[in-house]
């Protein structure tokens, strides 16, 4: 997670999955695309995320969890991870 030059990958460690992805963001003021590494640790009842920078990519999911509009919390960590890919 500390090495932010990793390639996107998925590795299994027993019942835990480690995922590294690159998130793309548009810097409209400078008209360029920025990249940020996001590392995820996923198990049956846990999703941990570690981001290279302070971009808040989880705000809409947090709002959905707080308001209960969608049943993300009851659906399991696999659906939570899927929901984050739809951002």
Image (cartoon, rainbow, N blue to C red):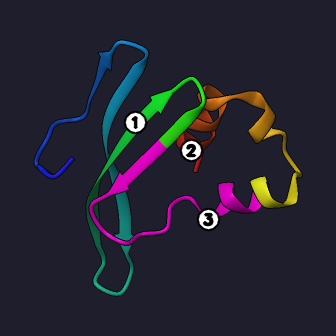
Q: Secondary structure at mark 3?
A: helix
- Number of residues whose C-alpha sits closer than 10 Å to that of mark 3, classed few (under 14), some (14–19) or many (20 or more): few
Question: Do the residues under discs 2 and 1 have CB atoms within 8 angstroms?
Answer: no
Compared across the picture, whether 87 is left or right of 10 comes to: right
Earlier residue among tags 3 and 1: 1
Q: Which of the pair 51/85 is nearer the observer? A: 51
Which region of the structure is painted magenta? 48-64
Residue 17 x, y percent position in the rendering: 38, 24
Please give the residue where the numbered disc 3 appears in the rendered image.
59
- Image coords of residue 8 (percent x, y): 24, 34
Which of the 4 quarters of the picture holds residue 29?
bottom left
Per the rendering, the mark at residue 41 is 1
Element type at marker 1?
strand
Q: Left of 31 or right of it: where is 87?
A: right
Label 2: state its secondary structure: helix
Is 61 positioned to the left or the right of 70 in the image? left
Outermost bottom residue: 29
Closer to the chain start, of discs 2 and 1, is: 1
The answer for how far apart the CA atoms under marks 2 and 1 are is 13 Å
Label 2 belongs to which residue? 84
Question: For residue 17, which numbered disc appears in the image?
Answer: none
In the displayed structure, 30 sits above or below 37; it is below
**N-terminal label among 3 and 2:** 3
Q: Are marks 3 and 2 in contact (CB under 8 Å)?
A: no
- Compared across the picture, whether 67 is left or right of 25 comes to right
Q: Callout 2: 10 Å neighbours few (<14), some, many (20+)?
A: few
The residues tagged by marks 3 and 2 sit, at their Cα atoms, a distance apart of 10 Å
Which is closer to the viewer, label 3 or label 1? Answer: 1
Based on the picture, tell me whether residue 63 belongs to the magenta stretch.
yes
């Amino acid at each position: 997670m500390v090495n932010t030059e990793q390639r996107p990958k998925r590795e299994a460690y027993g019942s835990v999955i480690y995922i590294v992805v690159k998130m793309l963001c548009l810097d409209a003021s400078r008209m360029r695309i920025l990249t940020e590494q996001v590392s995820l640790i996923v198990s049956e009842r846990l999703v941990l995320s570690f981001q290279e920078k302070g971009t808040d990519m989880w705000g809409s999911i947090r709002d959905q969890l707080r308001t209960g509009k969608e049943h993300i919390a009851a659906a399991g960590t696999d659906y939570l991870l899927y929901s984050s890919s739809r951002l």
